[in-house]
Image: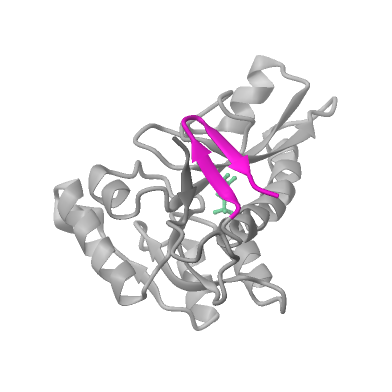
Amino acid sequence: MGVRVPPSANHGEPMKTKGRVAIFLSGRGSNFEAIYQNSLKKEANFEVVVIISNKKSARGLEKAKEYGLPAFFISPKKFGLKTAYEKEIIKTLKKHDVDLICLAGYMKIVGEELLRAYENRILNIHPALLPAFPGLHAQKQALDYGVKVSGCTVHFVDAGVDSGPVILQQAVAVEPGDDEETLSQRILKEEHRIYSAALRLYFENRLKISERNVIILA
Ligand code: GAR
């Protein structure tokens, strides 16, 4: 049986208030910025309420602070076990009344604790057309393989690496002479667009997970 997400207390009607989004990042934070800028638009149905990073030096964390957003470095090392680390994260998420987590260049595998607490409420963006080229350096993997088309994927997060049900994908042509940098830039532009598109669908309550499939309701 399919699972409608978020659990619909609103009987399939679009949500009335803005969805509250947490962004997890480890580095540059360009996807965070794109989501944040889109959230400021009048028609946006989501808002960014907290940023969490596992890296103290993440540029995205600095940018979040510049925007005046609540932004926290939570050190995995300080907590030792992943469950303890994620319990601390969950405390922060609860404090900010988060509906949905967006991984945006968050280079850590999400553990059981978070997956249980936010079941079907964690999204990720990946710079390849999954299931091709999961993991690190997806754009380089695509170039090394010699594909003519790559792209990006927004998907629900499960216990694997870049393996959960696919929500949206955008193909990007590999041009002759592309290197990792040029292909990454072209894919990134599409990442910035489809991540917010997926968020909009999520908070319109239009995503239904049916085993591996994500059905987009009309
Ligand atoms: C993005 O290209 C994102 O797709 C990728 O990390 C980059 C983060 O950039 N994520 C993965 O590879 C996840 N497997 P950003 O910090 O500028 O958003």
Report the side of 199 relative to 197 (left or right). left
User: At which x and y percent is residue 167?
Assistant: 59, 42
Report the side of 163 relative to 202 (left or right). left
> Residue drawn at (72%, 45%), measured in percent from left and top?
185
Give the image quarter of residue 108: top left
Q: Relative to residue 130, is residue 70 depicted above or below? A: below
Q: How many marks?
A: 0
User: At which x and y percent is residue 131?
Assistant: 56, 25
122 or 146: nearer the viewer:
122
Asked whether 214 falls inside the magenta stretch, the response is yes
Farthest residue to the bottom: give it: 68
User: At which x and y percent is residue 128?
Assistant: 62, 33
Report the side of 78 relative to 190 (left or right). left
Query: Magenta region: which residues?
Result: 206-218
> Residue drawn at (24%, 54%), measured in percent from left and top?
76
> Residue drawn at (44%, 35%), measured in percent from left and top?
1
User: At which x and y percent is residue 33?
Assistant: 61, 65
